[in-house]
Amino acid sequence: MSGQKVWYHFLARRDALAEEAAVKSLTAAGLRLCAIAAADAPSGPGIIFFDEADAQVCARLREASRGGLERILAVASTRAALANGASWGILRAGASDAFCWDHSRDRAQEIAARVARWETVDRVVDSALVKNNLAGESAVWRSALRQLVEAARFTDSPVLITGESGTGKELAARLIHTLDARPGKGELIILDCSTVVPELSGSEFFGHERGSYTGAVNARDGAFALADRGTLFLDEVGELSPRLQSELLRVVQEHKYKRVGGNTWQETNFRLVCATNRDLRREEAHGQFRKDFYHRIAGWPCQLPPLRERVGDVLPLVNYFLRHLCAPDEPPELDEAVRAYLLGREYRGNVRELKALVGRIARRHVGPGPVTVGDIAEDERPAFEALETDWRDTGFERAIRRAVSLGVGLKEIGSAAAETAIRVAVGEEEGNLQRAARKLGVTDRALQMRRAVRRADKPPASEAPN
C-alpha cells in the first residue's frame, strides 16, 4: 500500500504490546517497516508504540516530528495510556494522530490507510506545482499546505481560507482548484465580495433576465452559472451584508437559484472556496455574521499563518523571488547584514510586502556580487535604535511569562529552551549534527551526549504530562 519506508520504535514494555505480532500485522497490511534504536535520529514518517504518555514519549515525539515537519503516529498499548486528556498532550508534542492499538478491529489496515494518505498528501506538497506557487518549508506553513492539499484532493467540501492580508489566500484558492480531480472540471471564477455594489448584487451572483430592470437589455449569467462544473472563489466573503448572506443560503446548500426577474429554478454544480482576513468564527459567535451561512461555507476551514509565525521561510522566500526576478541569470547571494535585516524586519503586509521589498532591492542591485546594505532604500533602512535590539524580543518574553504563570520552574524553562534550540539547529542543518553543533557553539560530541542523556532520562510519573 505504501511505497515509502516507515520507521518504528517501541517505548512500550515488551509484555504490554507484542512487538513481533504488531510488526507482522502491519507488514501484512502493506507497510515497509524498519526498526530504529533509541539513539537514532529518524527522518520521514514513523510509528511510536508506548504504554505511558510521559515526558520521555513527548520528548521523543518532539524530536522525531521535527516540530511537525514529519508525520508520526503514536500508538498506545492500553486505553489507560490515553486517559485524562493525554491524547491532546501527545498531539501537542508532535504526533499527527494518537490512539490505542486495540481501539478497532482492523488496526493494521487503519494505520496503513493513514500512512498512505499522508504519503500521497506529502508527495503533492513536495511537488513543483506547489513549491513553484506557495514556497516555504517551515512546519507551520507545511501544515497549512497539507490542509489545502487534503481538502482539494480528497474532499468536495466548501473551503474557508482565513488569514491576514498578504498571506496568499488567492494563491491557495487557485491551488485547490488546480488539484481538484473532478472529471470535466470547469473554470475558476473569482468574485471579490468587497467590490459588489449592493444594488447589483443579485445580478452579480445570480444573473438576470432581459428587461428585469432598467438597463438590462440582455440576459446575463451570474457567478453561480459561470462556475458550473468549476470552482467559485468568493474573496473577502466577510464583507457580504447579512441580507446578501441570507440570499445566498439556498444556492450554497442546494446549488439551485433563480435569475433576477426569472421564475425558473436553475441548477449549478460548483465547488465553493471562500477567503477572508476577518475572524468570522468570532463574528458569528457575536451575531455579526450569520451562523447558518458560516457553517455552510466553512466545511473545511484552513488558516494561513502570517509571515511573523514562519520566520524560517523569510530567506527561502527572498531567494524564490530573486530567482524569478533575475531569470535567466543566477540570483545574487545576500550579504550577511542584509540577511540579518530581512530576518529582523516586520512585515505587516506579510508575503506580499516581502515580495515588493525584494523587487525594490533587486532593481537597485547592480553587478555580479551579493546584495549589500546599499541596495536597501534609505527610507527602509532600520533606525539605529533597532540595530541595538537584542534577540530576546517580546515573543521570547511572552513565552517565558506564560511558563512562569503556569508554575514552570527555572530549570525546566532552561531545559526547554536548550531542547528547542537543538531541535531548530538540527532541523535547519537537515539532521547534520556536526553543522548543528557548530551553529550552537558546542562540539558535536557534546551535542550527541546531550541528546542521548535526554532520551535515557525518563522522569517519574509525577512529572508526566496529562
Image (cartoon, rainbow, N blue to C red):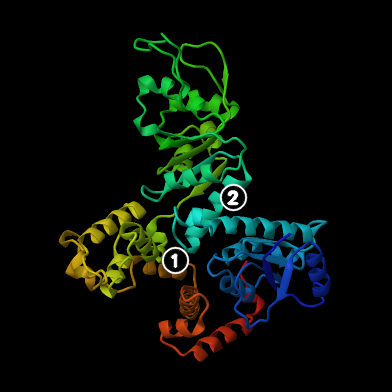
Question: Counting residues from the N terminus, which is met first, the one under dot 1 or under dot 2?
Answer: 2
Q: Which residue is mark 2?
A: 150
For image coordinates 32% across by 52% down, the residue present is 349
- Which SS class for mark 1? helix
Crowding near the residue tagged with mark 1, few <14, some 14–19, many ≥20 C-alpha atoms within 10 Å: few
Q: Position of residue 63 (x, y in %)?
A: 57, 74
Asked if 345 appears above or below 235 in the picture, the reply is below
**Side of 155 where 288 appears, left or right:** left
Q: Quadrant of residue 390?
A: bottom left
Q: Amino acid at mark 1?
A: Arg
Q: Check residue 402 in the rendering and tell me which mark sits there, or answer none.
A: 1
Q: Position of residue 465 (x, y in %)?
A: 61, 69
- Which SS class for mark 2? helix
Q: Quadrant of residue 8?
A: bottom right
Q: Which of the two marks, 1 or 2, is nearer to us in this view?
A: 2
**Side of 115 where 168 appears, left or right:** left
Query: Disc count in the image?
Result: 2
| Residue 183 visible, this orientation | yes
Asked if 448 appears above or below 83 in the picture, the reply is below
Residue contact at pointers 1 and 2, CB within 8 angstroms: no
Q: Nearer the viewer, residue 288 or 203?
A: 203
